[in-house]
Image (cartoon, rainbow, N blue to C red):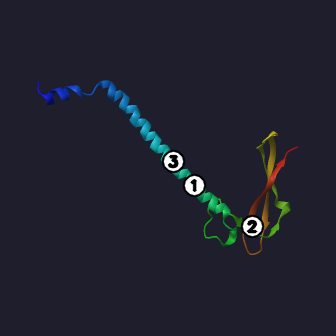
Amino acid sequence: MSTAAAANEAFRPQPLSFVLFIPSVVCGYLAYWQYQRSMWKGGLIAEREAGLNSPARDIYDLDELHDHAKVSCSGRYIHERSLFVGPRPRSIPGRGIQSGYFLITPLYQPDRYSCQTCHCHTASS
């Protein structure tokens, strides 16, 4: 028997090696996917923090509205057109869950569209 034939016979893959190799490949792929997902989430967080740390822009002068961007608007509240939206639950640490309503009030500015503002979460009791 030649040495090449002996070496070929010695390194013949066993069926068990394939059974152990496949889960390793799957776990490696899942680890890479989690790494990509972590980088994507980090980019989203950085983008949103940049939007929140930027100065407020006038809502009427925006070409397009970006997510999580600060905006400002001025005008006069039209309290007679206020609207309660709810009931809506709110979780407060140490107090549990409270039921309440959001108060939505239009903000009117002459020569412009009205802007809806959400004042607060008011308790129902």
Residue 114 badge: 2
* Circle nearer the viewer, 2 or 3: 3
* Position of residue 39 in the picture relative to residue 1 (left or right): right
Badge 1 element: helix
Between 97 and 13, which is closer to the camera in this rendering? 13
| Label 2 CA crowd tier, 10 Å (few <14, some 14–19, many 20+) | some
Q: Amino acid at mark 1?
A: Leu
Tag count = 3
* Position of residue 70 in the picture relative to residue 110 (left or right): left
Q: Amino acid at mark 2?
A: Ser
Q: Which residue is mark 1?
A: 44
Residue 78 is situated, as x and y percent measured from the top left of the image, at 83, 64
Q: Amino acid at mark 3?
A: Arg
Q: Reading the chain from its start, which is encountered first: label 2 or label 3?
A: 3
Between 61 and 106, which is closer to the camera in this rendering? 61
Q: Which residue is located at x 66 percent, y 73 percent?
A: 61
Q: Quadrant of residue 55?
A: bottom right
Residue 38 is situated, as x and y percent measured from the top left of the image, at 53, 48
Q: Are the residues tagged 3 and 1 within 8 Å (C-beta)?
A: no
Badge 3 element: helix
Q: Are the residues tagged 2 and 3 within 8 Å (C-beta)?
A: no
Q: Quadrant of residue 11?
A: top left
| Label 1 CA crowd tier, 10 Å (few <14, some 14–19, many 20+) | few
Residue 39 is situated, as x and y percent measured from the top left of the image, at 52, 51
Look at the picture and state if 69 lies above or below 89: below
Q: Which residue is mark 3?
A: 37
Look at the picture and state if 32 lies above or below 1: below
